[in-house]
Structure formats: structure tokens, C-alpha cells
Image: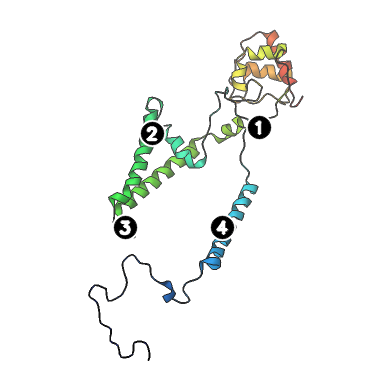
Amino acid sequence: MHRGKGMKFVGDSRIKAEGKMPNVPKDYSEYPGKTEAFWPNFLLKEWMIGAVFLIGYLIITVAHPSPLERQADPTDTTYIPVPDWYFLFMYQLLKYEFASGPYNVIGAIVIPGLAIGALMLVPFMDTSKERRPFKRPLPTGFMLLAFAAIFYLTWESVVNHDWEAAKAQGAIVEEAQFDENSEGYQIYAGSSCINCHGDAFQGGLGDPLVDTGLSAEEIKDIAHNGIGDMPPGQWTGSDEELEVLAEFIANLKSGE
């Protein structure tokens, strides 16, 4: 006897005609040729895409190594740190009068806190299932405003920053071997020169003084008349002290 032969099936009002319960996922075996096994088919594709991105990332790191700077010096008050590019908009925000100085808490905590809080509240303020942006004005407006603010502040930070000075202040320079007890260094340490050129002649606001290639006479002329961003009249000591200091700086060589 065949299964079901001679039998009649009747509907049950407690069960939907479709025979599907809510929150039960579809049986995708109903769609032959449109599905694939997770292992190994789908997972292999994921690994292949991941490998492409990983290789690309490694190529970029080899072609553009990290822009390392000189060893950090906590005593160097002339060094101006700059964050990575994705935090430049915050760096720029703290430059404005309403978010810096006595109002630093506003720029560092209040404004970012309000922005992040607003973005976190957007999903609760708009519970629509609509996916088209123009049908969801509230979240779309918030995201466009956030993007515009971040883009503008990042742009302003890049355009207005002195990148050449930043490169010079962080440049890795060879340190000179010198005697801190020598007369030349004692004169240097007691003058205003050390404030700009560093305690080890590594530079800061001023240029490094190692391997300058300048003669003692040229150094004395610069001390009196200035050069580049260095204004004239910086030397306030005696001519005899300047003579000793100029000879000392002219003989500063890296690794010697």
C-alpha cells in the first residue's frame, strides 16, 4: 500500500497554511545551484580575499616605511607632537579659541562627547526599516554633518601645519661626542644657544650644529648677524667666549 493512499489530509486552524513558523530561517536547499557549502567553498574564497589585502598591505609597508623620528626627549619643550592623520581633525579643533586654553575641556571632552553621543542615539531616534538615504533624513543628515566636519578640520590641519619644520624637528641626526666639561660646552650651556639648538646640538627650534661644515669665522658671523629664521643679535657674551664657542662648534663631528 502506497503511503497516503486512501487517506485524506485536513487543515488545522492552529497551523498556518504555509507551514512556516516565524523566526525560522528558510531551508536554502530549496534553491539548488544558488548556494554553496561553507567548508571549503565559501571559506576558501574568504581566505583568498584576505590574502590579497594582506599582501597589498605588506607591499605598502615595505614601499613606505614608518616615518620614524629621533628618540623622544622629555626635556625638549620646543618639540611639537603631531597625531596620525586620522586624529588631525581633533588636533585642529584644539587650535581654536573656543576649544583651547581655559576651554580645553570643551574641545577635548565636551564637543567630541556630544558628537559621539549623537551618533549613538541616531539608531534609537530613527527606527525605520527604510534603507534609502533620502527616506531617512535624520541619520543621513547626522552622518553628512559628521563627515563634513571631519573632512574640513583635517583639511585645515594639513594646509596650515608647517610640515618642513615638523620634519626638521624630528629628523634623526648623528650625535656628536663631546666633553661636557670642556670650556666650549660650558660657554654653550650658559648661553641662550642651547634653548634652540638642544643640549646635544641635535637642533630644535634651531638647526643641528653637528657637521655644519662652517668655519669658526662663519659661525661668529651668524651669531652676530643671524641667518634664515635666526634673527641677528642673539649672542650676548664676550668676543673671547664667542671665539672659543665658534671653534668648539666648528669641530663638532658626528661619531667623533
Q: To which residue does mark 3 refer? A: 134
Q: Kindly report the distance in space between the C-alpha atoms of the residues bearing marks 2 and 4.
A: 37 Å
* Viewer-nearest residue: 230 or 254: 254
Nearest to N terminus: mark 4 or mark 3: 4
Q: Residue 17's image quarter?
A: bottom left
Secondary structure of the residue carrying numbered label 4: helix
Quadrant location, the N terminus? bottom left
Circle 2 Cα neighbour tier, 10 Å, few/some/many (<14 / 14–19 / ≥20): few
Nearest to N terminus: mark 2 or mark 1: 2
Q: Name the residue rendered at 46%, 41% in the picture.
A: 154
Q: Is residue 181 above or below residue 53?
A: above
Q: Kindly report the distance in space between the C-alpha atoms of the residues bearing marks 2 and 1.
A: 34 Å
Q: To which residue does mark 4 refer? A: 50
> Residue 84 location, x and y as percent?
52, 39
Please identify, in this view, whether the residue under mark 2 or under mark 3 is nearer the observer. 2
* Viewer-nearest residue: 214 or 16: 16
Q: To which residue does mark 2 refer? A: 109
Callout 4 amino acid: Gly
Callout 1 amino acid: Ile
Nearest to N terminus: mark 3 or mark 1: 3
Instruction: Tell me the tag on residue 172.
Output: 1
Circle 4 Cα neighbour tier, 10 Å, few/some/many (<14 / 14–19 / ≥20): few
Q: Residue furthest left?
A: 13
Secondary structure of the residue carrying numbered label 2: helix
Callout 2 amino acid: Ile
Question: Is residue 38 rendered to the left or right of residue 70?
Answer: left
Q: Is residue 243 visible?
A: no
